[in-house]
Image (spheres, grey):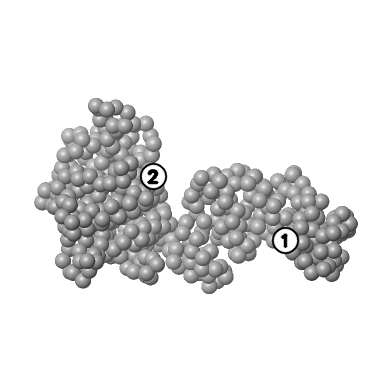
Amino acid sequence: MKYETIIGLEVHIELATDSKIFCSCGTTFGAGQNNNVCPACCGMPGMLPIMNKKVVELGMMAGMLTNCHINRYTTFDKKSYYYPDLPSSYQTTQWFAPICVDGGVEIETSKGKKVIGIKQIHMEEDAGKLVHDEWTDTTLVDFNRTSVPLIEIVSRPDLNSVEEVVAYLDKLKTLLRFAKVSDCKMEEGSMRCDVNLSIRPEGSTELGVRTEMKNMNSITAISKAIEYEVARHIDALERGTETLIQETRRWDDVKNKSFGMRSKEMAADYRYFPDPNLVPIIIDDEWFESVKERLPELPHLKKARYMDELGLSENDASIITSSRALCDVFEGATKVNGLPKDTANWILGECMSTLRQKKLSADDLDIDPAKLGIIVKMVADGKIVRNAGKKVLAAVFGEDVDPVEYCKANGLDAQSNAGEIEEAVKKVLDANADTVTKYKNGETKVRNALFGQVMKELKGKGDPASIQAILSKLLD
């Protein structure tokens, strides 16, 4: 029997704010344990929350990016449950009137394009973190993460494969990073995912028994967990290996399998009730429009513009628009030199190569766009050769170095004096008479070797176009 996999995701996004959702404590990742805490975020009796306005604005922005309806009247509620990292024994979240509802994003996979529905986006506070790596019999609690602002993006069960899940998460990550809603660094926990999964016979409309895997923060783990759970569900149905129950499970990266944690709670188990300490938030037209005006040009619109107006290939435009940092550098450099195709080639070639060597991502590209624009222009104009351009790029990457002055100080200006180049070409041809004979007998590929020898003679500073022209004059 063939089965269909039904997947819904709850994606928790840590918002890019300097302070927590209801107090002024910082949100810096990696701070000393229990340094970013106060009585308010630790839920001490008598402490009242103060709403962080930026959290609401970033929540609105996330909804706009994902084509959601923004509720102009939105409220906070208390979700009651006990866990050691939740000092107040409830989480402040949104249940009855979330800030965003009824949206969707388009993804593209090997099977084509598909819209993944979004049920809602709601604001909430994060919990603390249990620390038990250093002791076998003790668990400590770090409350730094308590009350760090989150949004939870709840998809509809429209996903049917690992490929679609990965495409959906990548799409969310790109959109949210573009608008600087979040850095979405999964390795730092600022993007975490709960996977709700069931299977059913193909053609059936009835959903199967659902399991949830909590707090996964890597694409690899999510992919392996889905594949494992699908196989486990099919085995249970076809071979009777176990009885499926609605439950929450934990994925173990070391053992590459999931383990049951507890039966899945229903909404009634959390005893949601309106938070009496937080007044409803009313979003008027002026506030709504001010947030909307701050939205950047979206990736798919940039991609179309890069292709239509700047002549980039679809592949180059797709890669550049996958990162806000790449777009910013590309547009800034192109504004300086007016060479979009050359600039794109340098970004996708030399800049990306440098990032890989430094084990950095595209979002970590740290170069002044104007300086890159100057480097690309100097190479295009023949003022320096490409290899020299690579040296200049390495020097200015993340540093306050003037590319023009660096070239002068290090003697990297291209040798374009026709007389000196011709003298070097003649010297190489005289020293490689056998190669010249092969070329004249039709082995044209050996010309590349001669070109390389001339460039070596000129210590890598010869103008390539001038060298080729003189080679043609003397050989043909």
- Of badges 2 and 1, the one in the foreground is 2
Asked if one can make out residue 55 in the rendered structure from this viewpoint, the answer is no
Real-space Cα separation, disc 2 to disc 1, in angstroms: 43 Å
Q: Which residue is mark 1?
A: 381
Q: Nearer the viewer, residue 158 or 5?
A: 5
Q: Nearer the viewer, residue 121 or 164?
A: 164
Residue 229: x %, y % from top left: 25, 53
Q: Type of residue at label 2?
A: Glu
Q: Nearer the viewer, residue 70 or 328?
A: 328
Number of on-image labels:
2
In this rendering, the answer to whether 313 lies above or below 34 is below
At mark 1, the secondary structure is loop
Residue at the spot x=51%, y=45% of the render? 359
Q: Earlier in the sequence, mark 2 or mark 1?
A: 2
- Where is the C terminus found, in terms of image quarters? bottom right
Relative to 99, 271 lies left or right: left
In this rendering, the answer to whether 277 lies above or below 334 is above
Count neighbours of disc 1 (C-alpha within 10 A) and say few if under 14, some if 14 to 19, many if 20 or more.
Answer: few
Relative to 164, 427 lies left or right: right
In this rendering, the answer to whether 277 lies above or below 435 is above
Residue 102: x %, y % from top left: 25, 65
Residue 238: x %, y % from top left: 18, 59
Residue located farthest toward the front when viewing the structure as drawn: 239
Residue at the spot x=87%, y=54% of the render? 431
Residue at the spot x=51%, y=65% of the render? 315
Q: Which residue is mark 2?
A: 187
